[in-house]
Amino acid sequence: MRLFAAAALRFATLLAGFSAVVVALTVPVGLLSGGPVYRSVSIGFYLFGSFLCVIGFFVGNRGPVRGNDGKQQSFLGMRQLHWASPQEREETLNNSAMFVVLGFALIILGILTDGRYPIV
């Protein structure tokens, strides 16, 4: 149970950090454009959340072949490759899931901050 609580705290910290960045970037844009600030913030959440979902999709579709981290090169200058270990594949899926879930959470925050349509 403590493991889930720690994971939820890390996720909430990530979500709060990304939300703060989006708000800090979009409030000045809303003030300069003369439109409602809530609208620019909601569009910022939509755009950044969609961007994170796309990044998560591409990270998750990474192939099973990885390049060596070192600067080893073969005789003709070609990179040395290796098959991804189970740990590397698990890390790829975890990163992908984190990007996608964080993106969806930001999109939901965009829906909640959009004042054009009442939630209740």
Image (spheres, rainbow, N blue to C red):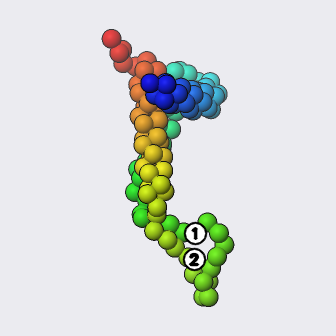
Residue 83 or 114: which is nearer the viewer?
83
Q: Nearer the viewer, mark 1 or mark 2?
A: 1
Which of 120 and 90 lies nearest the eye of the viewer? Answer: 90
Q: Disc 1 marks which amino acid? A: Asn
The percent coordinates of residue 91 (x first, y second) are 48, 50
Q: Nearer the viewer, residue 1 or 73?
A: 1
Q: Is residue 55 above or below residue 105?
A: below
Residue that lies at the very extreme toward the top in this rendered image: 120
Seen as rendered, the residue at the extreme bottom is 75
**In the rendered image, the vertical position of residue 1 relative to residue 18, given as above or below:** above
Q: Residues at badges 1 and 2 in contact (C-beta under 8 Å)?
A: yes
Q: Say which residue label 1 marks.
A: 68
Which of the labelled discs sits on residue 79, or is there none?
2
Give x and y (percent) for residue 32: 63, 28
- The N terminus - image quarter: top left
Residue at 33% of width from left, 11% of height from top?
120
Q: From the viewer's perspective, is 17 left or right of 50?
A: right
Q: Going 55% across and 22% down the picture, which residue do you hit?
A: 37
